[in-house]
Structure formats: C-alpha cells, structure tokens
Image (cartoon, coloured by chain):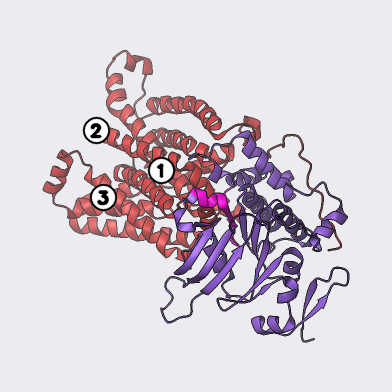
Amino acid sequence: MSDRGKSDSARLAALRGLRVVAPEAGPALVALREVAYRHPGAAASSPEAVKSVTLSIAAGEVVALCGPNAAGKSTLARLACGLLQAEAGAVELGGAAIDSLSRRERARRVAFLGQQSATELPFTGREVALMGRAPHLGLWALEAPGDRARADAALAELDVLHLADRPVSQMSGGERQRIFLARAFAQDASLTVLDEPTLALDLAHQVLLVNAVRSRARQGQGALLVLHDLTLAAAACDRIVLMSSGRILAEGTPAEVLLPKILEAAYGTVVDVVHDPATGLPLIAPRVDR
Amino acid sequence: MSRPPPPAAPPGPPFARRSLSSALGYSTSSASAAVRALRMLVLLLPLLAAAVAIGLLVGGQPLSLRAALAGVEPDATILRALRVPRVILAAEVGAALSLSGVALQALLRNPLADPFIFGLSGGAALGSALLAVVAPAAAVGVASLLGLVPQQAAACAGAFAAALLVFTLGRSRGQLLPERALLLGVVFNSFASAVVIAVQALVRPERTQQMLLWLSGTLGYETRSVLVSAGLAVMLPLALLTALAGRLNLLALGDDEASSLGVDVGQTRALAFLAASIAVGASVALTGLVGFVGLVVPHAVRFVVGPDHRVLLPASALGGAIFLVLADAAARALFRAIGAEPPVGAVTALIGAPLFILLLRRRA
C-alpha cells in the first residue's frame, strides 16, 4: 500500500518518471463527455464555468488539472465526483452513468477532498480518518477492526499516525491537511480527486503526498489533482490537463503541455521552461521584473 | 526534490489521549461507538437520579422525602403536585435544549452554536406569542380538544422559520459563515423579544410582567398531559438525531466532503433542523427563553466523551436534564431566605454567558 519499505533512491526514481503504469483494464475510472456547467444564479448570457469538456482517467493514471484562477478547475473536479450536476453532457464512473449510482456506491468509486475542509469540532486524527470508511459501513458507521487498520494505514502513509489521538482543531494547517488527505485515502475509492491538496504542505510533505498518490496508482487506483505548481505537476503526473476559461486548452504528457507558448496563452504571462538535466522533466520559471 | 520525505511514524503502542477521556476510558481507539454510548448511559443515569433527588428536596418548603412517600401531608402533596412536575419539566427542557445545541453545532461545524444564540429560541417565542395573541381563542380550544398542542406547534414553526432565516442569510457564495450566522441569530433574538413585548403590551398590557418573566425563562408547574407531550417533543428529536449521528459526524468535514462520502447533505441538514426546531419549540412554549443550556452542556459532555455524535447526542440529552434540574434547584435554594425566586433562565445565563466568552477567547 505504501512505499515506505523502499529506499530513497527508489522513491526518487518513481518520482522521476520510471513508472510502472498498471495495464489498462475495464472502463475508465471517470469519463466526462462534452460536459458543460453554469453556476446557479449566473445569467443565461454569461459564459459557462465549464464548456463542453471531454476527459477520462484510466486505472493507474495520475492526472493534473492546471490553469489560471477561475479557469473552471474546481468546477470540473466537482463535476467528476458528482458533487455538481452537469447541465449538458454525460459523466460516467467505472462505465456506469453517475446518476444511476447510489450515493454510497458513488462514494466507493470516487473520493474527494476540497480546499476548505475544516472543522472547529475536536475530532481526533483517527476519528477523521475513520470517516473515510463510512461508504463501506452501515447507517451508524460502526467500524470493524479492519476499518481501523485501514484508517491507521492511511494516517501512516501521510506521516500523521503520531497525530492520531490529537484533535484536528488543535493542529497546524499542514498537519490538518494531511489528516484530511488520510481520510480521502482511507475511503479506498478507485479514483481520488484532490483540489489543491498541496496548498498547506511544505516541500517534504508535497513529495510525500505525490509518492503516496503514485504508489496507489501502481495498484490501479487513479487520481485527479488540481495543482497550481506546474513543476510539481510535471514531476507527479502522467498527464497534464491545462484549462482556460472553462475549456481544455492543452492536454498531454508534461513535456507536451508545458511549453512556453501554451503557458503564455493560458496564463497571460511570460515563463521560461527549462529541463532538469537529470530527468528531462520540465521546470517552470516565471519571469519577474526586478 | 533533494530532500527525501521524512520516515512515517512507526505503528507504535496505543497512544495516550491527551484529555480527560483517556482517564475515564473513553478513548476512541479502544471501543466502538455503541459500547461507548452504553458506558456513558451507565455513568450518567445515576447522576440524573441524584440530580432528581436534589430537585425534589430543594424548595421554599422543607420536605422529608420519607414522609412524603409515606403519604404524610403536606409533604405528599408538595412532592406530587409541585416538585415532581417541576423536576420532570426541567429534565425535559434541559434535554431538549441540549440536544438542539448539539445539532446546531454539528450543522455549523462550530461548538459556539446554541439555539438561544442562533435565534431559534427567539423564533419559537415569536411563534408562540403571536399565536396566543392573534389566533381566536375558540380555534385554539378546538385544536386542543383534537389533541394538538397549538402553542407548541406554533413555537416549533417559529423556531424552524428562524433557523431557515439565519441559515440562509448566514451563507455567502454557498458557504456558511458561522460568525455571520451567530451574529444574525443574536440580532434576531433581540428583534423577536422586542416584537413579543410590543405585541403583548398592545394587546394585553396587564400581562406584561408575566411576559417578561417568560422571556427570561421560567419553569412553571405543568399538567400531566403537557409533560407527556413535552416528553414526546424530546424523544422524537433524540431518536431522529441519534439515527443521523453517523452522518452528522461526516458533516464536520464540509458539505462537499460529506456528500462525497455518500451523505445526502440537504436531507440530513433539513432533518436535523427539524429535530432541533421541535425540541426548541416545545421548550420555549413551556418555559420561555432559557439560554445557554445548549452551549454549556454539549461543551462539558464533549470534553469528556469527545465530539462523536453517536455518543455525544444521548449523553448530552442526559447531561442537559441533569444540568437544568440542578440549575432550577439552585434558583429555588439560593433565594429561599428572601422568599424570591429568580427565573431559571437567569441562572443558566449567569453560568453560560461567562463560559461563552471564555470559549471565544480560547478560540482566538
């Protein structure tokens, strides 16, 4: 489940693109076809937040969703989880129309963590991680020892097992975020959608998260990560989907998408793209007046 | 990328929970929610019995429990006609207010929510008072004959309307802002009190004094049928909320996250608001505005059992009953010498308001 047993060099190798992609089997984990969405209350004449987007994620694939603010990334991520209802187009999870699935069945297929997950209630780290097991449990969510083991494994994967008995309301932002990520991991859905998961994380914990996501991908799970950091996206993901004004502007491997021209068109600012001599991965350098 | 990730913590021995919970054996890692809920009931039921005994013994007239039970007058009559109904009412109202406090705190993801602070009590008072003034006495009489409790129903409707108002206006771009909702609730409570007093003063000036007492929260002596209907108004929300407890836990993660875990957020929220409104409406119709019970009790109970609603809800219901029975006994005992008796709402406010400030400061 975790790659804790591996040496650091093996972890770095995994991060640098020596990837074992699981063989594609069965339908896509999620498939969006010509999906469109307009925010409620927006005028009919105003542009849609998401315009006719087609996207699918296969088993074992890690996909980054990038783009400028208000490009529609978070909206698309929520459409993929069924948290928003598409105005037009179709969304399928594992080959089944998302509307045909019960809420619990949906929750077993896709896990979601947004940006504003926070609570003032003093649930402990383990209690929060255990909440991820809810789709697998009954009405009162009475957990079995196996669920506790799953929750603890997820906490260990994100290096927060030592915080299992502390209230999340007393944790730092980074600690809390890793607890919430552990909740999403404990859900053991075939697809995990994370909206800007690295926002509160320091460098080491960003790498830890990416390694955990990749390790799960090697076992056939998929991930959709909304990321602002393009360099991290290039290192972490098999595919980058670059959005702008509600549409997909470019899509492909990091080397195909992260080109200065494309990025300038998307962000409206000049960037340099250099390549890591060791790995060949693109590194994004913004140009700043100084 | 030069720095390898820190090693994951080893799966070590059982962790020390840094709170009272571990000392009492309520560690979440050791027992399932059902076992913890049962343990809590075993601990709290004797405490409730003790509180009830105190509530029966304390009052303007010294009472011998043994004499009363042996049928010696006037002790027997005082016990049966005055103390017992009063203690039952206090227990019911305490449980109801405490339950609705837990429900609102879960919905707002914030331990500072309370039916009084949140405006539900004000809404209930408004509904109840408007009915008393506006509805023709004949209609109310007919409804009562049919077994309905119009004043309580009006209070429940008022509480639900206030909840809707505060919850709708407290949102901004789809996100509930707890501070904004709480502020709205406080403002709405003042507004409701003002309207109630104004309406009363215009329609029945002779009852203004009584109205003021009611607005500050007073336990009276109710008939058996009223106590039974109030009991139902506690048991129904208790059952509903306890059934929802697993989902209320998940709501703490956020609306989208709870929904992605399979919770029908809209339905859960509506049912929890309904349960809270029934509990608050019934309480306010009978006792007026008893404040801060829904704040003080869940906070104390959460300190012992943690925030898991599967344990917190039943424990808070019992804790609320214990608290209000004792607060009422204190109101009667402390001022016995001068022959006066402050409304129980004054006692709960004296305890609750400083605690609220303390909590607010600790959070900042």
- The image shows residue A49 at horizontal and vertical percentages of 51, 74
Tag 1 secondary structure: helix
The circle drawn on residue B154 is 3
Between discs 1 and 2, the one toward the N terminus: 1
Q: 10 Å neighbourhood of mark 1: few (<14), some, or many (≥20)?
A: many
Colour displayed for chain B in the image of the structure: red
Residue at x 70%, y 52% (from the top left corner): A216
Asked whether A142 or B275 is in front, the reply is A142
How far apart in space, not on screen, are marks 3 and 2 (Cα)?
Answer: 18 Å
> Are labels 1 and 2 assigned to the same chain?
yes
The circle drawn on residue B97 is 1
> Are labels 1 and 3 assigned to the same chain?
yes
Range covered by the magenta-colored residues? A104-123
Q: Is residue B114 left or right of residue A53?
A: left
Q: Which residue is mark 2?
A: B225
How far apart in space, not on screen, are marks 1 and 2 (Cα)?
Answer: 20 Å
Asked if the stretch drawn in magenta spans residue B204, the answer is: no
Q: Is residue A92 above or below residue B147?
A: below
Q: Is residue B250 above or below residue A222?
A: above
Amino acid under label 3?
Ala
Q: Residues at badges 1 and 3 in contact (C-beta under 8 Å)? A: no
